[in-house]
Image (cartoon, rainbow, N blue to C red):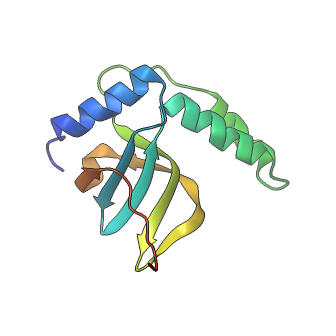
Amino acid sequence: MSKHDELLVAIAALVESGQSNQMSLTVVTDGAVITGRLAPETVWRQRVSEVLTDSTHLGEFSVIFDTATEKNGPPTHLHFHVARILQGTVGIPETGGMYRVAIEDINAWTVGDFSYSDH
């Protein structure tokens, strides 16, 4: 989006201020559909750091996510927790992942997350 969607920025700001990870959202960005729950950046960074710390090969990268930077102005990114990239009838990964998406790259969005059922 060349101009940020004011509603989407307001949702991101509310998630950041409330330290909540209960807001479900689905976005379309560069043709990919990502669905899941939003998390405040600090919570997202902490979880990514924990995952990296537990990794034999990637542990050294965890420190990058431990260091939060001071932000001025409205949020510029959405931080998805327990999220999936939708591909046909499959969500990748099935268990959910951690995704960071620039708000300016979002082409469309809707409140709620999508899941598939064979029923």
Q: Is residue 83 above or below residue 16?
A: below
Residue found 30% across the figure and 22% down from its top: 73
Percent x, y of residue 85: 45, 65
Percent x, y of residue 70: 47, 19
Quadrant in which the C terminus is drawn: bottom left
Residue found 50% across the figure and 55% down from its top: 83
Q: Front-most of 117 and 109?
A: 117
Is 57 on the left-hand or right-hand side of 74? right
Residue found 46% across the figure and 37% down from its top: 22
Residue found 17% across the figure and 35% down from its top: 6
Q: Front-most of 80 and 64?
A: 80
Which quadrant of the structure image shows residue 72? top left
Q: Residue furthest left?
A: 3
Which quadrant of the structure image shows residue 87? bottom left
Q: Is residue 75 visible?
A: no
Q: Is residue 88 above or below residue 83?
A: below
Q: Residue furthest front?
A: 119
Q: How many marks?
A: 0
Q: Is residue 9 visible?
A: yes
Percent x, y of residue 86: 42, 69
